[in-house]
Amino acid sequence: AQSVTQLGSHVSVSEGALVLLRCNYSSSVPPYLFWYVQYPNQGLQLLLKYTSAATLVKGINGFEAEFKKSETSFHLTKPSAHMSDAAEYFCAVSDPNFGNEKLTFGTGTRLTIIP
Amino acid sequence: DAGVTQSPTHLIKTRGQQVTLRCSPKSGHDTVSWYQQALGQGPQFIFQYYEEEERQRGNFPDRFSGHQFPNYSSELNVNALLLGDSALYLCASSSPPPNYGYTFGSGTRLTVV
């Protein structure tokens, strides 16, 4: 069984400040991990993914995440927030074994950027 | 390169009715998954289709059924609609490892009245 916990349903940061969105996972097998962004009334857009290669993963729009097995974490960061980053962010985990690849999502973190 | 296409974008149905949602996967993807996203929640896995067979299923009742066609497109059917079925229904297509990844469509917003 797999699960994801996103700490903080709402996060507010000032424009230009560091963005840190937290994600902890639970998995019985080495997981694949993902961060998705969702803008209002839209689908999900992949920001980045960890698939057992480099533990520091760089994604689109300046975001990156680090897989830390010892902490079972996959926190999302961005050095400098932009107004366009305001959105809902979802962390997700999957079992990479063929036939078991469904995504299990966290409850999401709404990011607000303060001008 | 077209991504995942879902239709319709919005629809309104009455309790007890049946609905069919459609999804065309991204070119090169052979696996289609469906997710339900209730307002303010994360997406919940409904089921996954591969080679026209249901391969994995989440915790959803039998009122939810699906189909995958030889061209990899897929349908989600929901019978005997309940008010609680109102949600955004997302389709995702994926490619197998090592080029593993999911691409989501923009979803179908279903409102049951």
Image: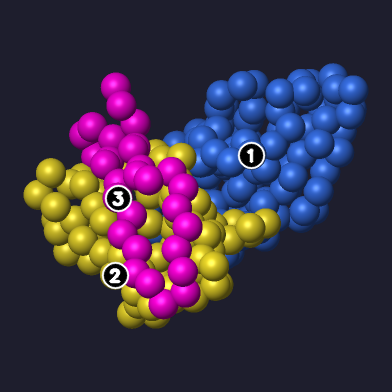
The magenta segment is B1-29
Tell me which amino acid carries mark 1: Pro
Q: Cα distance, mark 2 to mark 3? A: 12 Å
Quarter of the C terminus of chain A within the rendering: top right
Judge whether B7 appears above or below B53 on screen.
above
Name the residue: 83% across, 30% down: A113
**Residue A103 shows which numbered tag?**
none
* Residue density around tag 3, few if under 14, some if 14–19, many if 20 or more, within 10 Å: many
- Indicate the colour of chain B: yellow
What residue type is disc 2 on? Ser
Which x, y percent locates residue A52? 45, 43
| Amino acid bearing label 3 | Arg
Compute the Cα span from label 1 to label 2. 28 Å
Tell me the SS state at disc 1: loop
Q: Which residue is mark 3?
A: B22
Q: Which image quarter: residue B65? A: bottom left
Tell me, yes or no, whether the highlighted magenta stretch contains residue B18: yes
| Label disc, if present, on residue A40 of the rendered structure | 1
Residue pointed to by mark 2: B65
Q: Report x, y in % for residue A92.
A: 54, 52
Residue at 43% x, 73% y is B81
